[in-house]
Image (tube, helix red, strand yellow):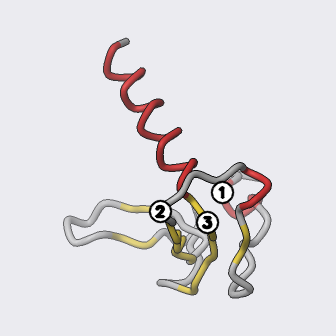
């Protein structure tokens, strides 16, 4: 429980200083039908995007977080078995 509380506190601190978020194209999407594989051969699934976070020096509220106008994340359906 103590570790979870420290993790939550860290997340809150990170969120306070977040100014902008955006997504850039990465390896490309892969779903359950055709997963990508890492260097040890383990499968993984992805929407193909990488998140980019910009942090500032002063705390912000959630309303002050802006978005980079880059790639748009697809619908979460890529992760479902349907």
Which circle marks residue 57 in the picture? 2
How many badges with numbers are in the image?
3
Q: Position of residue 9 (x, y in %)?
A: 45, 31
User: Are there few (<14), some (14-19), or many (20+) residues within 10 Å of tag 2?
Assistant: few
Question: Mark 2: which secondary structure?
Answer: loop
Q: Position of residue 16 (x, y in %)?
A: 57, 48
Which circle marks residue 79 in the picture? 1
Q: Which quadrant holds residue 69?
A: bottom right
In the rendered view, tell whether residue 8 sits above or below residue 5: below
| Residue sitting nearer the eye, 63 or 82 | 63
Residue at the front extreme? 58
User: Are there few (<14), some (14-19), or many (20+) residues within 10 Å of tag 1?
Assistant: few
In the rendered view, tell whether residue 45 sits above or below residue 59: below
Report the mark closest to the observer, 3 or 1. Answer: 3
As measured in the structure, the alpha-carbon distance from the residue carrying label 2 to the one carrying label 1 is: 35 Å
Which circle marks residue 19 in the picture? 3
Q: Residue at x 74, y 60 (%)?
A: 64
Question: Mark 3: which secondary structure?
Answer: strand
Circle nearer the N terminus (3, 2): 3
The N terminus sits in image quarter: top left
């Amino acid at each position: 429980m103590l570790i979870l509380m420290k993790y939550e506190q860290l997340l809150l601190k990170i969120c306070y200083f977040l100014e902008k978020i955006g997504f850039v194209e990465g390896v490309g999407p892969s779903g359950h039908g055709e997963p990508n594989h890492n260097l040890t051969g383990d499968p993984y699934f992805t929407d193909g995007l990488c998140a980019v976070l910009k942090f500032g020096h002063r705390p912000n509220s959630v309303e002050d977080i802006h978005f980079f106008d880059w790639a748009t994340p697809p619908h979460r359906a890529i992760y479902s078995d349907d």
